[in-house]
Amino acid sequence: MPPPENRIVTHSLLPALLALGLAATAPLRLAAGVNEHGSSEAADAAISASMSAILQGDSTRALRALAAVPVDEYRGFDAQYRACMSARFERRSPPWLAGGIEDRFVQDVLHAYQDYWWRALAQPPQREALTGQLLQRLRALLGDAAAGADDFATVEPLLIAELERRGYHALMGRTPPLRELMLWRNQESREFDVTLPDGPQRVHVELLDDFLSLGWSAYGRCERGSNGGWATGESLYAVMPAYRTRGGLEGERFKVVFLGHEAQHLADKDRFTGLADWELEYRAKLVELAQAGEGDVGQARLRGFISSQGNDMDAPHPYANTRVIADLRERLGAEPDAVPRAQLHAAALELLARDTRRLEARGAARPAAD
């Protein structure tokens, strides 16, 4: 999922450039011709293409990728995903998915965002106009409290405060290319020590749980993948549903995909200025590849980077994937998924060090503290 811009975290009304850790459930190919769910290689590739299209804000292209493969080539979990995508997006109007919430105001806020996501994903050229309509809808929900609030920067703090009053935590802002809403009930604070390529980093982490909304990237992929977390200037925020069935706090997905990735964002923001969103993601993805072990997590992440590439800088995750894979291919002289894990680790560390030298030469390094 692309990194958020000007996001607001509950308990802190300061806008911050956040960087998003992406937890995606990509198909895993086990044997020639089939993946772990028994789907064909073509169906496996179509699912990856559909998720990549969603992350770039285009549900029509996602549906086209899935429809290109006969329905009987999708099995099990993959068949459920294809059916859900068809039911959610092959229709004339957005489905009602905001039920089960007793508070009518909270229900209306969630429905407003889901309606916006559905339409914006289906009509990328109308994205700006639809975003304006969302703003007006949120102002109407706030009523007199939104008097004089004429942009997201003023409306979102009011909205978050009202949700907080009703017992809900929220994250808003823009996760390129769409406006975001993550909504949860429970939150716990913890401290973790993370070993990064350039040294140790102690991080404060908020563990978030009991979600009503996992954001637009999850909505667009029928919850097959979701935001794994994000970083502000002071803290990391972990979306615990993304890790609970994958080893929890002791699992490699949490330690590498979340802690390693997001701690690198904190370190880079502390060390450099003026980094583009894709540059932050490029460096954090290299850290993931350098830290992942021999198990499925590293394999799945590399495969996810390969299958979800893009050339639009406004979709920083796919764009960073393109740069990571191209640079690895050049460094290795081979496809990244065709070399031993140790060789891939070494190449990722070399590319990270090279990028650090590039940023220093550009003058991006912050002056040393007195």
Image: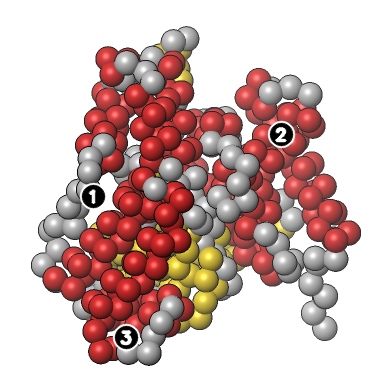
* Disc 3 crowd, CA 10 A, few/some/many (<14, 14-19, 20+): some
Q: Closer to the camera, 272 or 158? A: 158
Q: Which quarter of the picture shows residue 41? A: top left
Q: Which residue is mark 2?
A: 326
Q: Which residue is mark 3?
A: 146
The residues bearing labels 1 and 3 have C-alpha atoms spaced at a distance of 26 Å
The residues bearing labels 3 and 2 have C-alpha atoms spaced at a distance of 47 Å
At mark 3, the secondary structure is helix
* Disc 1 crowd, CA 10 A, few/some/many (<14, 14-19, 20+): some
Amino acid on which the number 3 mark rests in the picture = Ala
At mark 2, the secondary structure is helix
x, y percent for residue 111: 23, 61
Q: Residue at x 54, y 31 (%)?
A: 307
Left or right side of 233 for 133: left
Q: Quadrant of the C terminus?
A: bottom right
The residues bearing labels 1 and 2 have C-alpha atoms spaced at a distance of 38 Å
Mark 1 vs mark 2, foreground winner is 1
Q: Residue at x 28, y 88 (%)?
A: 145
User: Which comes before the other along the chain, label 1 or label 3?
Assistant: 1
